[in-house]
Image (tube, helix red, strand yellow):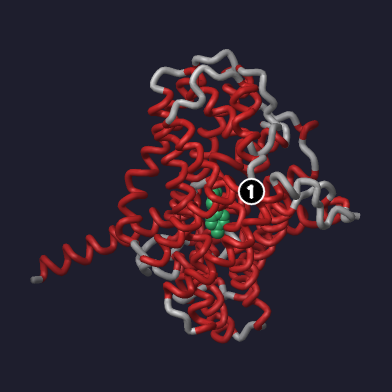
């Protein structure tokens, strides 16, 4: 029996670290890497933006990822309830509950437009499987994308399908199946991205694409670009939403949070960079605009699928995997609201999922209409920073660039200034050297970086 116990314990430990890495990676890797990273890099001039983004991941994203997972594991409840417990334990102000509250609201808002984009991806499975892009040029492929955006009922339909899939998974709580799916899905998605990079190497735009992505031209970097790089570092790692806290609450105490966070952060970063390497060469080879905006991957990749051999199979697989990657992020985005509703209202899991999901679906209609009938509606247009922004643009901008960094900043401040160094060192089980580094970064560098970027962007507002 001794042997059995040891073996079981060993297996459990391994499997729980692995399960956590999968869930956290599933949340992190999604539309943010493959849809958003390339297009905002394109809009913000390329290399210099990428460099600032990588700095933000290292100096801000990673420390906050560690901080949030640690807070979640210590609290061992939903983000809001965990913060309540920690606050009373540390005798701190109840204002720190906002770490959980801002995050829960932000995740809710993000899912409303994330699901609309997820719907595009489902729709594109249909286009690729029926060979709609074969032999088409840039204008024709762009035309298909434009026609999709112009049709509110079709956008609403695919948004509804995406939300229904999300709700089905969250309500059933099919953790096991999902974990298994992520185990083969992430490597498969990655392999297909590599296939796309190899294809991109055969195009005439490869050198230009690589240099656009990797050669920093600081004259193209604006203050707003820096804010967006910071915001995207939060978005892509699912920070400032309570998601990593919620997932951390299921984490075993013998798992190294530092190593685990580095794994998740690295995988997320590599997927984004490889996506950029796959997309920009195709963009340049076809004389497209890198700053084309949210449609970038929905035009450049189909163009490649339409002209490469096996393009129908590879294209279909690609969009299927993109949908899965989006779903594993979407379920994490719904989780904080569902947990909160369960705690607050006493709804059971299924009811809470339907209520939260129904509300997200309804709000998603505003994003659907922003793309066509309401494309000239700019609710906060009188504020210079929000000029010309549709409701969809605002939801994206305010969550990624304001709410997530704010909630993440508070999490870093809580760990660095409310908790005692000994308590943090013990929870992270770090040796002196790494602990001193983590401590100084979390206390000073991370908050200073977020505050400086915020102050600059308020300067923009004035
Ligand atoms: N990190 C996801 C992505 O890059 O697609 C998006 C996301 C998921 C953001 C969960 C925030 C979150 F809480
Ligand atoms: Na991501």
Where in the figure is residue 100, as x and y percent of width and height? Answer: 59, 72
Where in the figure is residue 84, as x and y percent of width and height? Answer: 56, 82
**SS label for mark 1:** helix
Q: Quadrant of residue 112?
A: bottom right
Where in the figure is residue 351, as x and y percent of width and height? Answer: 46, 75
Indicate left or right for 108 with 398 as reference: left
- Label tally: 1
Q: Residue 449, can we see it?
A: no
Indicate left or right for 418 with 162 as reference: right
In front of the other: 131 or 241: 131
Who's the residue at 42% across and 55% down the image? 260
> Which quadrant holds the N terminus?
bottom left
Where in the figure is residue 263, as x and y percent of width and height? Answer: 44, 49
Who's the residue at 69% across and 63% down the image? 406
As displayed, is residue 10 above or below residue 207?
A: below
Q: Quadrant of residue 91?
A: bottom right
Q: Mark 1 = which residue?
A: 232
In front of the other: 390 or 197: 390
Q: Residue furthest left?
A: 1
Who's the residue at 65% across and 69% down the image? 102
In front of the other: 2 or 435: 2
Who's the residue at 50% across and 40% down the image? 123
> Which quadrant holds the C terminus?
bottom right
Q: Residue furthest front?
A: 153
As displayed, is residue 376 above or below residue 51?
A: below
Q: Residue 248, can we see it?
A: yes
As displayed, is residue 111 above or below residue 132?
A: below
In front of the other: 418 or 289: 289
Q: Residues within 10 Å of mark 1 (few under 14, many from 20)?
A: many
Label 1 residue near ligand 1, CB within 8 Å: no
As displayed, is residue 364 above or below residue 46?
A: below
């Amino acid at each position: 029996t001794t042997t059995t116990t040891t073996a079981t314990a060993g297996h459990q430990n391994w499997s729980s670290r692995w399960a956590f890495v999968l869930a956290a990676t599933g949340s992190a890797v999604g539309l943010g890497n493959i849809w958003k990273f390339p297009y905002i890099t394109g809009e913000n001039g390329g290399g210099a933006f990428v460099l600032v983004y990588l700095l933000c991941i290292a100096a801000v994203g990673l420390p906050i990822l560690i901080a949030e997972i640690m807070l979640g594991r210590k609290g061992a409840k939903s983000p809001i309830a965990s913060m309540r417990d920690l606050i009373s334990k540390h005798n701190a102000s109840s204002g720190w509950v906002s770490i959980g509250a801002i995050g829960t609201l932000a995740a809710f808002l993000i899912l409303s437009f994330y699901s609309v984009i997820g719907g595009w991806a489902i729709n594109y499975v249909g286009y690729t499987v029926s060979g709609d892009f074969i032999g088409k040029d840039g204008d024709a492929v762009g035309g298909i994308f434009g026609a999709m955006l112009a049709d509110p009922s079709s956008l609403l339909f695919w948004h509804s399908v995406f939300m229904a899939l999300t709700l089905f998974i969250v309500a059933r709580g099919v953790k096991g199946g999902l974990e298994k799916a992520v185990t083969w899905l992430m490597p498969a998605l990655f392999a297909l991205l590599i296939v796309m990079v190899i294809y991109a190497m055969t195009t005439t735009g490869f050198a230009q694409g690589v240099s656009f992505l990797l050669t920093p031209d600081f004259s193209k970097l604006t203050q707003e670009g820096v804010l967006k790089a910071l915001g995207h570092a939060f978005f892509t790692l699912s920070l400032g939403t309570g998601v990593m806290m919620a997932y951390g609450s299921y984490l075993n105490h013998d798992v190294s949070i530092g190593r685990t966070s580095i794994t998740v952060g690295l995988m997320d970063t590599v997927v984004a960079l490889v996506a950029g390497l796959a997309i920009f060469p195709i963009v340049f080879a076809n004389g497209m605009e890198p700053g084309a905006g949210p449609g970038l991957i929905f035009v450049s990749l189909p163009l490649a699928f339409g002209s490469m051999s096996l393009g129908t199979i590879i294209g279909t697989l690609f969009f299927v995997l993109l949908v899965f990657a989006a779903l594993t992020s979407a379920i994490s985005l719904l989780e904080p609201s569902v947990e909160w509703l369960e705690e607050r209202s006493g709804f059971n899991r299924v009811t809470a999922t339907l209520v939260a999901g129904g509300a997200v679906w309804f709000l998603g209609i505003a994003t659907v209409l922003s793309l066509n009938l309401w494309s000239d509606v700019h609710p906060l247009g009188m504020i210079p920073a929000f000029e010309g922004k549709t409701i969809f643009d605002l939801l994206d901008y305010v969550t990624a660039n304001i709410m997530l960094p704010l909630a993440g900043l508070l999490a870093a401040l809580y760990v660095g200034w409310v908790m005692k160094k000994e308590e943090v060192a013990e929870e992270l089980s770090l040796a002196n050297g790494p602990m001193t580094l983590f401590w100084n970064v979390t206390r000073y560098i991370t908050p200073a970086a977020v505050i400086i970027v915020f102050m600059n962007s308020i300067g923009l507002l004035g």
